[in-house]
Amino acid sequence: MADPLSLLRQYNINKKEIVERDSQIIFGEFSWPKSVKTNYLKYGSGKKGAPREYYTLECLLYLLKNVMLQHSVYVRQCAAEDIPAVNRPDRKELLAYLNGESQTCASIDKSAPLEIPTQVKRAAEGEPISGEVAAKKARFEETQVQKVREQLAARWDVSQKETAVNMDNIKSLSETMSVEKIAAIKAKRLANKRTTIKRTDNDEAMGTDLRAILDYDVDSTKDIISRERQWRTRTSILQSTGKIFAKNIFAMLQGIKAREEGRNRPQAPNPIKMPEPTRIAKPQPQLSQYNRYDQERFNRQKEETEGFKIDTLGTYHGMSLKSVTEGSLAQRKAQANNMPGAPGMPGAVVGRPKELIPTAQARQLPANGPQKRPSRTPIIIIPSANTSLITMLNVKDILQELRFLSTAEKKLQGCQRDSEVLLQRKRNNQTVSYRVIDNPIKLSQQDWQRVVAVFVMGPQWQFKGWPWDGNPVEIFSKICAFHLCFSELKLDANVERWSVTLLRLSQNKRHLDRAVLSKFWETLDK
């Protein structure tokens, strides 16, 4: 519903004309009395038990008209014209709102009762808008219209009397023509008298009066039609005026029909093929494929090395690049020293040619190069269940950014689940990395020595397949255990009796997340 304060602001910003007429202020088709109260509170009203007072529409409109005056001069003019003045504390903020510099104001009371505006009749098309020109239009008053109607009724009565034939005044003309026949002729003449009578000045004046009456009725009809509203029903709303049935619906039906015809179209008969003459298939030699379990077959193929004495079972595993590139002499010495049948080693046979060791046996020998350095990155284990508050999707936000984001929110952002996450934590001007996983089954015995924290959910099956026989009491004595939950929900029974650190988050107060999640790192650093 339109309120006077909003319309006054809208008309003032758009520089539209505001009409004042007969103690009424008109905004287009809405009208309010000048003394109507707006929902703008006066300064100091409604505080400390004081009643609420509002500025009137006339008061705000008078301020806009005299905005260039000094406040003291403006107050004197308001007192002279008996119009309430706007208080000085409200002047700056009120003018900023009415001029569109601010969107709202603290003094606007949205719960204040508003008066319903009066509907103003709009001028019809082709009619003048101003009231003075409309007042000059010639109209018949009710008394004059009544007078014209009485004249028409009088003439109708006279014509009715003329059509009635008085039998007493008629005398018989002869014996052959009776009185009844003469009366019939006279009645026929009076009936045709209307078409043969000449028009007089009074008749022309009467026609002008009839046209005036019709004009008066047309004006009244226009006034009634302007106030009418179309009765809209479910049927009238469903009847769309912007869609053309033949253009829109027929196009869809044609597409469906074409698709159905294409689906039901009979398939073309297969052409008859003449039988081809049989061809004798030549046997193709089968290519021998490598098989790691069929090494004996390759041993029989040594003759195919064309006498180059190539040992197909030889390997360079465990040899450095230098020993390979020095030549065959250095290679033979190195192989002779490492072979079990070499001179000086137990079980060596003198005069027996040296042999290369198999690949499987060579892989078991220790490599000459440096071994791989074991990782020292700490490991944090979290639950793999989707019902857990901490998952692989939001673990980085919770432990690194110290703010809680649910798994559903991360899925809406399009985040993908990783098999492991690497956290970067700054401590004492140093960056420490932490590896987060949710599948501890793939950890080796050395990896378990680097596990520093574990998040528990409550069910004991979470520790199935873990070291220490999956006993939670023994696991928590060696690894720091944590439980992330909402403070408004009931705690799990297993968690209550386990030695775990509780991280209780609020479901709605996200500004408290950092203080709660910092407790994780404080406990881990102890």
Image (tube, grey):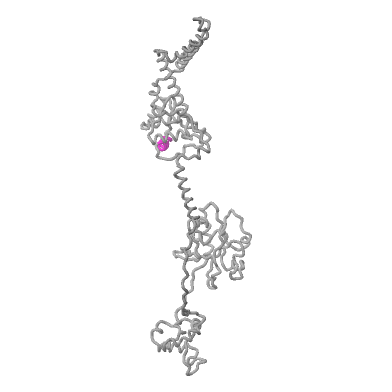
Asked if the stretch drawn in magenta spans residue 380, the answer is no
Please identify the dominant SS of the magenta region: helix
Stretch of the chain drawn in magenta:
89-98
User: For the point 39% across and 34% down, which residue is it?
Assistant: 12
Which residue is more in the foreground, 21 or 137? Answer: 137
Position of residue 352 relative to residue 171, above or below, is below
Asked if the stretch drawn in magenta spans residue 95, the answer is yes
Which residue is more in the foreground, 151 or 390? Answer: 151
- Residue 386 location, x and y as percent? 55, 60
Which residue is more in the foreground, 212 or 44? Answer: 212
Q: Residue 34's quadrant in the figure?
A: top left
User: For the point 41% across and 27% down, which residue is it?
Assistant: 20
- Residue 315 location, x and y as percent? 45, 83
Which residue is more in the foreground, 249 or 230? Answer: 249
Extreme residue in the left direction: 68
Number of numbered markers: 0
Extreme residue in the bottom direction: 351
- Residue 399 location, x and y as percent? 50, 60
- Residue 135 location, x and y as percent? 40, 22
Q: Can residue 41 be seen in this view?
A: no
Position of residue 101 relative to residue 285, above or below, is above
Q: Can residue 57 be seen in this view?
A: yes
